Image: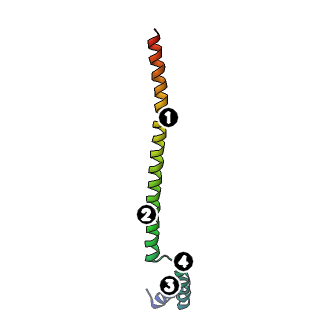
Amino acid sequence: MSTEESVAALEARIESLATKEDIVRLETRMVAWEDYMATKKDIAELKGFIQESVSQSEIKTLKQFIAFWVVIAGLSIPILSGIFSFVFNTLTLR
């Protein structure tokens, strides 16, 4: 490879490299993004909020589950009582 070819190859590569102005622009954009980035404190607060929400949801679901089965039990007692009394009365009439 001749010197001229090496210089041409280097010139082609140099055009694709970032300039100082490009780096400064990128740095400026990154500084602007810092306001929107989460810190460790933000993440810790979010984690606590999520854990609290999940435990409140679990408690609410458990209360609904218990209430459902109390209602089912409350309805099944009169229904079963009626069925048994009907069957008993039917059997004693013969």
- Label 1 crowding class (10 Å Cα cut-off): few <14, some 14-19, many 20+? few
Callout 4: helix, strand or loop?
helix
Q: Residue at x 43, y 63 (%)?
A: 51
Mark 3–mark 2 Cα distance, whole angstroms, equals 52 Å
Give the labeled residue for mark 4: 36
Please state the horizontal and vertical placement of residue 24, each as a whole percent of the image: 54, 89
* Amino acid bearing label 3: Arg
Mark 3–mark 4 Cα distance, whole angstroms, equals 35 Å
Give the labeled residue for mark 1: 75
Please state the horizontal and vertical placement of residue 80, each as a whole percent of the image: 46, 27
Mark 4–mark 2 Cα distance, whole angstroms, equals 23 Å
Give the labeled residue for mark 3: 13
Front label number (3 vs 2): 2
Q: Nearer the viewer, residue 14 or 48?
A: 48
Callout 3: helix, strand or loop?
helix
Please state the horizontal and vertical placement of residue 2, each as a whole percent of the image: 45, 88
* Amino acid bearing label 2: Gln
